[in-house]
Amino acid sequence: MPPSHARPPVVADERTQLVGWLDLQRALVRWKCAGLTDEQARRAVLPGSPLMTVAGLVSHLRWTEHCWFEVLFLGGPSAGNPQFDTDVEDADMRPDGVPLARLLDEFDAQWARSDEIVAAHSLDDTGRHPDFSAGAASLRWILLHMLEETARHVGHLDTIREQLDGVTGYY
């Protein structure tokens, strides 16, 4: 069953609303990918942005959550996250040969891991990574940033999807 596209309650505590809005945007990422072929997911339709593909965006969002929640907030290793690849620019936007279904499964797994981290910490807790100044951000700030980042890219997915096959809509 697909994740709910319901908005969070209009009256709720801060955590419920922040996580609820982020979960809605994450669900919309999945929804924007529904029914696409791997070929469509890799097709660049914005002439000035050849890496801005459905597959590239799903990969980017997965690795961005990993970066903020696991590396910067928890202080974990950055090895394996292509965002830290200094040899290939925008490596996280280049999921060459990885099927869309696998990218979405990895996005879902990261989503679940990020939610575990959020549930285990106070919104006032701050990051632990000593090598990055952004590592000092509060969990609240990180959640707001991830909401902004994900929603912005859902807008990109909206545009790309309409160009690929004409499918439009927020819900």
Image (cartoon, grey):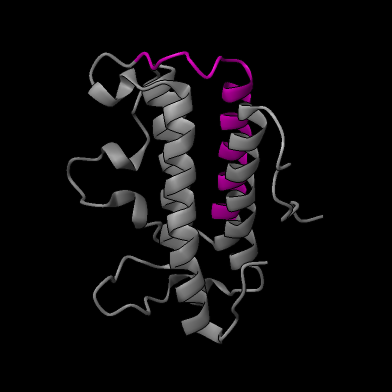
Q: Quadrant of the N terminus?
A: bottom right
**Residue at 57 percent of width and 15 percent of height:** 121
Residue 131 seen in the figure? yes
Residue 97 seen in the figure? no
| Residue 100 x, y percent position in the rendering | 55, 62
**Residue 114 occupies which quadrant of the picture?**
top right
Residue in front for this viewpoint, 21 or 82 = 21
Magenta region = 102-128
**Residue at 64 percent of width and 50 percent of height:** 24
Residue in front for this viewpoint, 148 or 42 = 148
Residue in front for this viewpoint, 145 or 87 = 145
The single residue placed furthest to the front in the displayed view is: 11
112 in magenta? yes
| Residue 39 x, y percent position in the rendering | 50, 76
- The number of numbered badges drawn on the structure is 0
| Residue 103 x, y percent position in the rendering | 54, 53
104 in magenta? yes
Q: Main secondary structure of the magenta part?
A: helix
The single residue placed furthest to the left in the displayed view is: 87
